[in-house]
Image (cartoon, grey):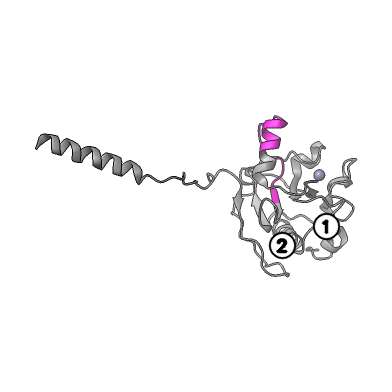
């Protein structure tokens, strides 16, 4: 009887192992990583975006627009490059990243921890614009391609919200190449089209 019990026990053990899941269930990234807002579905930007509300504790005077100069990407990928390859302790140098459908959703806005913690940026290469400039990076290389309509709609909506939150006038919404010797955000970025849709 005792042998039978042991046998049954081992059969149970083997059976249990056989039923173990073959795949490891992935866990969503922790909340301290870049948060994700819903991509915008309409062409016209909504009045308020679904980005996390944080107290504004830094004097933000500018919004600086960048492209990633890459075909694909997302906030986590750029965070890795900035943190590991460039050795920046604060990681992701931008405050926001807007996806193009390659690496994150088309028009998806990712919010970096520098915005959530109201840290200075590491995107402009000029102290004034890093300290007081909100860095927004659109995924893509706009020397060769153009931003997608969804990226532009999200960008306009995001900038309008930041203008309201921080009291930033349209003339202080600038491109990276306005403050640094760079092509960023590329020759195909429609700056005046964006400007025309911003708050006066
Ligand atoms: Zn740039």
Asked whether residue 88 is in view, the answer is no
Residue 141 horizontal/vertical position (percent) = 82, 50
Badge 2: few (under 14), some or many (20 or more) residues near its Cα, within 10 Å?
A: many
Name above or below for residue 119 compared with residue 186: above
In the foreground, 3 or 93: 3
Q: Residue 91 appears in which quarter of the rendering?
A: top right
Badge 1: few (under 14), some or many (20 or more) residues near its Cα, within 10 Å?
A: some
Please identify the quadrant where the C terminus is shown.
bottom right
Please identify the quadrant where the N terminus is shown.
top left
What residue appears at the point 19 percent right and 37 percent down from the top-left corner?
A: 7
Q: Residue 150 appears in which quarter of the rendering?
A: bottom right
Q: Nearer the viewer, mark 2 or mark 1?
A: 1
Write down the residue under mark 1.
Answer: 146
**Closer to the N terminus: mark 2 or mark 1?**
1
What residue appears at the point 73 percent right and 47 percent down from the top-left corner?
A: 60
Write down the residue under mark 2.
Answer: 157
Q: Which mark is residue 161?
A: none
In the foreground, 53 or 148: 148
Say what secondary structure mark 2 lies in: helix
Name above or below for residue 59 compared with residue 7: below
In the foreground, 161 or 66: 66
Residue 134 horizontal/vertical position (percent) = 74, 47
Asked whether residue 195 is in view, the answer is yes
Name above or below for residue 105 compared with residue 8: below
What residue appears at the point 59 percent right and 54 percent down from the top-left corner?
A: 52
Is 84 within the magenta? Answer: yes
Query: Quadrant for ligand 1?
Result: top right
Contact between labelled residues 1 and 2, with CB atoms less than 8 Å apart: no
What residue appears at the point 80 percent right and 36 percent down from the top-left corner?
A: 127
Residue 193 horizontal/vertical position (percent) = 85, 63
Q: Which residues are magenta?
A: 80-97
Name above or below for residue 157 compared with residue 138: below
């Amino acid at each position: 009887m005792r042998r039978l019990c042991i046998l049954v026990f081992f059969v149970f053990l083997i059976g249990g192992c056989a039923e173990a899941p073959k795949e490891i269930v992935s866990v969503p990234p922790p909340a301290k990583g870049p948060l994700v807002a819903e991509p915008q579905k309409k062409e016209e930007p909504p009045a308020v975006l679904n980005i996390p509300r944080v107290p504004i504790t830094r004097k933000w005077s500018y919004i600086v627009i960048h492209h990633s100069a890459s075909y694909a990407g997302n906030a986590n990928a750029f965070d890795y490059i900035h943190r590991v390859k460039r050795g920046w302790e604060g990681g992701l140098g931008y405050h926001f990243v807007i996806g193009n459908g390659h690496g994150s959703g088309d028009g998806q806005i990712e919010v970096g921890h520098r915005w959530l913690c109201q840290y200075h940026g590491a995107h402009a290469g000029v102290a004034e614009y890093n300290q007081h400039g909100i860095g927004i990076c659109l995924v893509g290389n706009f020397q060769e391609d153009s931003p997608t309509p969804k990226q532009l709609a999200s960008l306009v909506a995001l900038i309008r919200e930041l203008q309201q939150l921080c009291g930033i006038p349209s003339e202080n919404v600038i491109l990276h190449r306005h403050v640094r010797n760079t092509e960023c955000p590329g020759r195909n970025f429609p700056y005046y089209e964006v400007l025309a849709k911003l708050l006066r």
